[in-house]
Amino acid sequence: MLDRTQGLSLSVNPAAVPFGTRPLAPGMGMEIVGVDCAGEISDETFQRISDTWHDNCVVLFRNQSLDEEKEWKFARRFGETGKVHHNHKGGSKFPGVMYISNVRENGELIGALPDGEMFFHHDQCYIEKPAIATMLYAMEVPSTGGNTIFANMFAAYDALPADIKARLEGLKAMHVYDYQSNPTTRGAVIKEGTPHYAHPVVRVHPGNGRKALYVNRLMTDHLVGFERRASDELLNYLFDHSEQKQFLYEHVWTPGDLLIWDNRSCIHARTDFSAAERRLMRRVAIVG
Ligand code: SIN
């Protein structure tokens, strides 16, 4: 029987090297080396981690060895850990902790979002106070695929033509998510009672004052106050614009990787993978 509370046993001690950073892609993302996320982290080092994260949308720590409690404790340095919505059996006593997995025990899924491709989205944008950050720790990964792709929404906003930026001023978009049916691709019909919330299309990041686009292909349904056709036209333009290659970083997972992404400044998606291979990730939602 799988013990999901355990971390991985890894031979590399990340704290044996000094704090350093390495860009993950030209458009976004930074690897941080020299930090053991399960160990003692001084306020000064944490401030460096936090600044690096705000400016680069995503940070990666490799070769980490984290059980549920250690991952949750590290997540708590970033803020309160929140409520999670899911429709699977497995759970955790630590608030905000859940599993993303296609693994079944006695025929039942132990994690959420089990299979295949996921469209780009911001976590929890369909509620009033979405998670500001998400932490994802890889425990088991398929031999190919199941990669997580991030898009830098600061850069996507900056690159918009001036007339589009002017059109977006003051607009709100309605975000909707049905996590009971297929949660990975957009449904054609939205069921009554599905969680939804309208947020500004452009948001200012409180950590650095930069503007970021806040719409995504999976969960953004319409622009508030627009006719459906006009809304679809502008939203499809924004989805295609923000998913361009120059704004992306695609992470190919190795067990022991810990990623933290900023839901205020990036969207993420997942590539397809074989249902015959196991994928087990532990996720913590940080609400601020
Ligand atoms: C998620 O959207 O939280 C899951 C991403 C992943 O499974 O890579």
Image (cartoon, grey):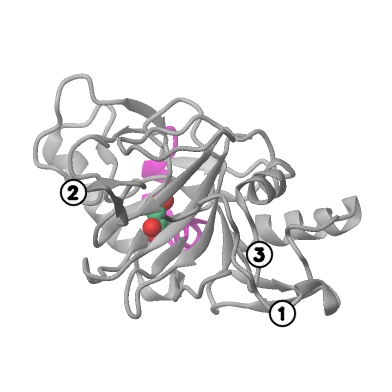
Identify residue type, mark 2. Answer: Glu
Neighbour tally class for label 3: few under 14, some 14-19, many 20 plus, Cα within 10 Å: many
Which secondary structure type mostly characterizes the magenta part of the structure? helix
Q: Residue 233 carries which label?
A: 2
Q: Residue 57: x and y, percent?
A: 58, 59
> Which part of the image, by quadrant, shows the N terminus?
bottom left
Please identify the quarter of the rendering in which residue 60 is found: bottom right
Q: Mark 3 points at which residue?
A: 65
Q: In this view, does 184 lie above or below 79?
A: below
Q: Is mark 1 within 8 Å of ligand 1?
A: no
For the residue pair 76 and 64, the one nearer the viewer reads as 64
Identify residue type, mark 3. Answer: Ser
Neighbour tally class for label 2: few under 14, some 14-19, many 20 plus, Cα within 10 Å: few
Q: What stretch is highlighted in magenta?
A: 152-170
Q: Residue 174: x and y, percent?
A: 31, 31
Say whether disc 1 or disc 2 marks the residue closer to the N-terminus. Answer: 1
Q: In this view, does 51 lie above or below 218?
A: below
Q: Farthest residue toward the top?
A: 193
Please identify the quarter of the rendering in which residue 252 is found: bottom left
For the residue pair 3 and 199, the one nearer the viewer reads as 3
The answer, for residue 59, to whether it is visible in the render is yes
Callout 3–callout 1 Cβ contact below 8 Å: no
Q: Name the residue under label 1.
A: 12
Q: Is 161 inside the magenta-drawn segment?
A: yes
Q: What is the CA distance from the residue labelled 1 to the residue labelled 2? A: 50 Å
Q: Residue 109 carries which label?
A: none
Q: What is the CA distance from the residue labelled 3 to the residue labelled 1? A: 9 Å
Residue depth check, mark 2 versus mark 3: number of the one nearer the observer: 3
Q: In this view, does 112 lie above or below 257?
A: above
